[in-house]
Amino acid sequence: MAEEKIVLLIDEEGVISAKTIGFKGEACLDALDKLLGPQTITSIKKTDEYLQQVSAKSSIKINMKRK
């Protein structure tokens, strides 16, 4: 799994810009909401990573007995 990062930039006027790296899908928005609060975000520019699907791996082990 790729490392997930949030880079915050604060300009001279105090405006905060955030860039997420390594997140896929809406996980980036969830992380930003937790960090900054949902009322803080005023605009979003979606990247290619946003459009990528999150793949979940699962495995099932079935034990069967003969009768």
Image (cartoon, grey):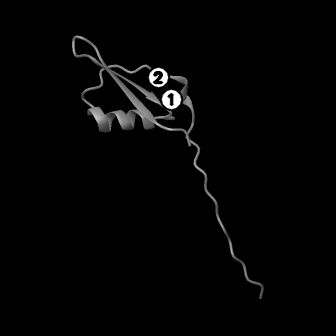
Please state which of residues 40 and 66 is positioned toward the viewer in this rendering.
Answer: 40
The residue sitting at the right extreme is 66
In contact (CB < 8 Å): disc 2 and disc 1: yes
Task: Determine which residue is flagged by label 1.
Answer: 50
Query: In the image, which disc is placed on residue 33?
Result: none
Image mark count: 2
- Report crowding for label 2: few under 14, some 14 to 19, many 20 or more residues within 10 A (C-alpha): few
* Location of residue 26 with respect to 17 vertically, above or below: below
Please state which of residues 32 and 43 is positioned toward the viewer in this rendering.
Answer: 32
Q: Classify mark 2: helix, strand or loop.
A: loop
Under mark 2, the amino acid is Lys
The residue sitting at the left extreme is 13
Q: Residue at x 28, y 13 (%)?
A: 11
Q: CA distance from mark 2 to mark 1?
A: 6 Å
* Location of residue 18 with respect to 66 vertically, above or below: above
Task: Determine which residue is flagged by label 2.
Answer: 46
Q: Residue at x 54, y 38 (%)?
A: 2
User: Could you tell me residue 43's position as x and y percent?
Assistant: 34, 19
The residue sitting at the top extreme is 12
